[in-house]
Image (spheres, rainbow, N blue to C red):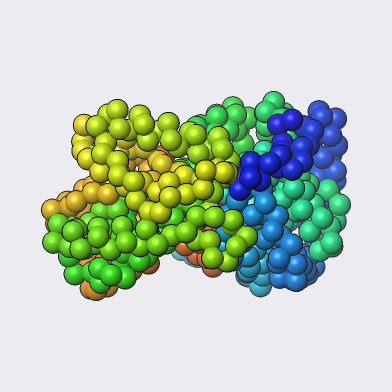
């Protein structure tokens, strides 16, 4: 079975699910299109009722959803609960703001002869959402909340190790009052992606995943002339300048690199520390990682979760070995981790000079790359020496300096004096090999929208 729940803490297979059939996919497409034709004309107020209801259910049943996320991908239960709350906040954001974000815009013109142009924002149809395993609920909600609020329909292909989380969305949206067909989880097989994107009723695809997956899906969407948004990998820089509060920066670095067991696109994967504070920072960072406790993700005392699967741990271990073969230096840091389950011992990787290709890799787990920068300019150079451009952080006591450095970093997002973390009312997305398009706020809700010009012109106006 391609879709299976496997508890990463025990490696026990909990449940398996069969792939969707071609007929089931076609039924989902037909029902989604029929529902869309009505939903597109439904008022924002009525759509908002559904979004608010979904948020209320998530808040009410937070423990149920959080346990499911922890069961299927292994994250800490407390982190799962925070993710469920963030998902509720996104539903509420669009319930409150969708109408304002999509209101018609009167366009300025040089003179009355040019007419009275208005830009209206209309839904386009069915959006295919292909989502990863590291945030079972948030990743899905940041697509369905804006797209359903905009008047579109959504079909979901979730990660194969999250079948129960995926199914939970069918139950959630039905209970929230969403009309049948507007959202459906599909245990889609690989050929179904092309089948769906080649259907004329589908307007595009939103994917969050690896660079490799993005290349494949973008290619299929391109051939079908369908819009795509891609939120792919990242190797975010965490810059510590010479005037930073080093103790607090080190504490944030430990959190920024190890939340969700380091399996975050915007995790602080590359620590870039200016020479003047490097030794102090490194000692504090090692001390902080050593204090992490690996164990049962349902135990409140646990601060380091297992990886999402044994395969993920094995792949990461192989990647580290290849980096060492290229000359990287690897040091074991932190307390020992359990032998049972998909745990991975935290590692510190250095020696990643210009001759080592591993400096351009994304390590999806508790592997920290660390760089000693000569000064601010060198830190910026190292930060920009990456094929990725998702997020980043800058630590300095001078906020103006931090903003200047942030502008010099070629990414989609930069936080100053804080590791990057997603919020319901902030945009999310990157550049370069980290993908294209934006999610959340007004940018996200307008990705799969027809921005239609309607212009009333005097019939006697000159051509």
Q: Nearer the viewer, residue 22 or 200?
A: 22
Residue 460 can be seen in this image: no
Which of these two is toward me, 460 or 423? 423
Q: Residue at x 74, y 43 (%)?
A: 14
* Rendering quarter of residue 280: bottom left
Counting every numbered tag in the picture gives: 0
Percent position (x, y) of residue 353? 21, 38
Residue 381, image x, y percentages:
21, 48
Residue for point 26% across, 36% down: 328
Taking 444 as reference, is 307 above or below it?
A: above
In the displayed structure image, the side of residue 369 where residue 226 appears, left or right: right
Residue 70, given in percent of the width and then of the height, sits at 64, 54
Does residue 189 appear anywhere in the picture?
yes
Quarter occupied by residue 102? bottom right
The N terminus, quarter of image: top right
Q: Left of 400 or right of it: where is 184? A: right
Q: Nearer the viewer, residue 9 or 391?
A: 9
402, above or below 137, in the image? below
Residue depicted at x 82% and y 40% = 28
x and y, in percent, of residue 10 in the image:
63, 45
Is residue 35 shown left or right of residue 337?
A: right
Q: Which of the 4 quarters of the picture holds residue 416?
A: bottom left
């Amino acid at each position: 079975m391609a879709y299976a729940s496997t508890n990463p803490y025990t490696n026990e297979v909990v449940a398996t699910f069969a792939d969707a059939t071609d007929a089931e996919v076609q039924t989902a497409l037909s029902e989604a299109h029929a529902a869309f034709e009505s939903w597109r004309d439904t008022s924002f107020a009525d759509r908002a009722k559904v979004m608010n209801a979904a948020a209320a259910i998530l808040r009410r049943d937070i423990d149920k959803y959080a346990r499911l996320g922890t069961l299927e991908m292994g994250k800490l239960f407390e982190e799962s609960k925070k993710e469920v709350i963030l998902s509720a906040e996104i539903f509420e954001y669009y319930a409150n703001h969708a109408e304002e974000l999509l209101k018609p815009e009167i366009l300025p013109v040089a003179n009355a002869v040019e007419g009275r142009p208005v830009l209206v924002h209309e839904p386009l149809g069915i959006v295919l959402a292909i989502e990863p395993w590291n945030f079972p609920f948030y990743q899905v909600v940041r697509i369905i909340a804006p797209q359903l609020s905009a008047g579109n329909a959504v079909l979901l292909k979730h990660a194969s190790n999250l079948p129960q989380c995926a199914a939970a969305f069918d139950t959630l949206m039905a209970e929230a009052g969403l009309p049948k067909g507007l959202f459906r989880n599909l245990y889609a097989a690989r050929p179904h992606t092309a089948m769906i994107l080649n259907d004329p009723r589908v307007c595009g695809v939103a994917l969050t995943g690896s660079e490799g997956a993005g290349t494949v899906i973008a290619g299929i969407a391109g051939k079908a002339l369908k819009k795509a948004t891609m939120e792919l990998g990242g190797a975010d820089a965490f810059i510590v300048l010479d005037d930073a509060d080093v103790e607090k920066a080190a504490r944030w670095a430990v959190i920024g690199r190890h939340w969700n067991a380091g399996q975050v696109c915007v995790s602080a994967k590359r620590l870039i520390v200016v020479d003047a504070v490097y030794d102090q920072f490194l000692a504090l960072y090692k001390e902080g990682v050593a204090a992490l406790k690996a164990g049962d993700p349902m135990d409140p005392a646990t601060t380091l979760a297992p990886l999402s699967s044994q395969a993920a741990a094995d792949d990461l271990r192989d990647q580290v070995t290849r980096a060492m073969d290229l000359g990287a230096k690897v040091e074991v840091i932190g307390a020992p981790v359990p032998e049972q389950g998909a745990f991975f011992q935290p590692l510190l990787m250095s020696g990643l000079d210009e001759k080592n290709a591993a400096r351009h890799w994304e390590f999806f787990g508790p592997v920290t790359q660390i760089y000693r920068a000569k000064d601010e300019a060198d830190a910026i150079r190292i930060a920009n020496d990456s094929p990725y451009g998702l997020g980043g952080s800058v630590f300095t006591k001078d906020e103006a300096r931090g903003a200047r450095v942030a502008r010099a970093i070629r990414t989609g997002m930069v936080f100053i004096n804080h590791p990057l973390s997603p919020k319901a009312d902030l945009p999310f997305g990157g550049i370069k090999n980290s993908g294209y398009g934006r999610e959340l706020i007004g940018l996200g809700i307008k990705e799969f929208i027809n921005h239609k010009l309607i212009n009333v012109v005097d019939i006697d106006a000159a051509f």
